[in-house]
Amino acid sequence: MSLSPAFATAGSKLQDTLRPKSLIKVLFFTLVVLLSAIESRAQNEGPESTTLVDESYSLKADREAFEELRKNIPANVKKGQR
């Protein structure tokens, strides 16, 4: 008892239809895994130093100058009165 040619042809067409879908799924899964690995590696490496601004830039002198200027503000202006 053998299958008619119509059934044999239908089976191969079904397999041909499933192969590209399976290939796309495998490629998508691979892409997701690779992107996850790249992201994980980037997070583990992190920045080389924790300092965001170069040490040569300092606001200390500016802050001290503002404190000196604030000493000259009258008391009624400090309270919000004019």
Image (spheres, rainbow, N blue to C red):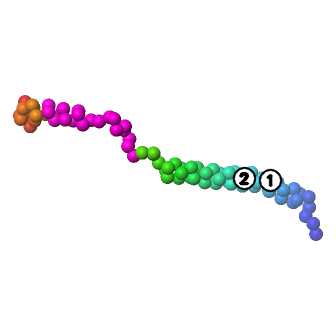
Q: Secondary structure at mark 2?
A: helix
Number of the label disc, if any, that sits on residue 33: none
* For residue 77, side relative to residue 15 (left or right): left
Q: Quadrant of residue 6?
A: bottom right
Q: Amino acid at mark 1?
A: Asp
**Figure quadrant of residue 48:** top left
Asked where in the image residue 53 lies, by quadrant, the reply is top left
The residue depicted at 14 percent of the width and 33 percent of the height is: 68
Q: Position of residue 61 (x, y in %)?
A: 23, 34
Q: Establish if 63 lies above or below 6.
A: above
Single out the mark in the foreground, 2 or 1. 2
Q: Is residue 39 left or right of residue 22?
A: left
For this view, does 7 lie left or right of residue 59?
right
- List x then y, in percent, for residue 70: 13, 33
Number of other residues with Cα within 10 Å of mark 2, as a class: few under 14, some 14 to 19, many 20 or more: few
Q: Residues within 10 Å of mark 1 (few under 14, many from 20)?
A: few
Where is mark 1, residue-wise? 16
Q: Is 3 located above or below residue 42 in the figure?
A: below
- Residue segment shown in magenta: 50-69
Q: Tell whether position 59 is magenta.
A: yes
Tag 1, which secondary structure? Answer: helix
Q: CA distance from mark 2 to mark 1?
A: 11 Å
- Mark 2 or mark 1, earlier in chain: 1
Coordinates of residue 20 in the picture (x, y in percent): 74, 51
Name the amino acid type tagged 2: Leu
Which residue, as the protein is rendered here, is positioned at the far right? 1
Q: Residue at x 53, y 52 (%)?
A: 40
Provide the residue designation for mark 2: 23
- Vertically, is 62 above or below 19? above
Residue situated in front as seen by the camera: 39 or 9? 39
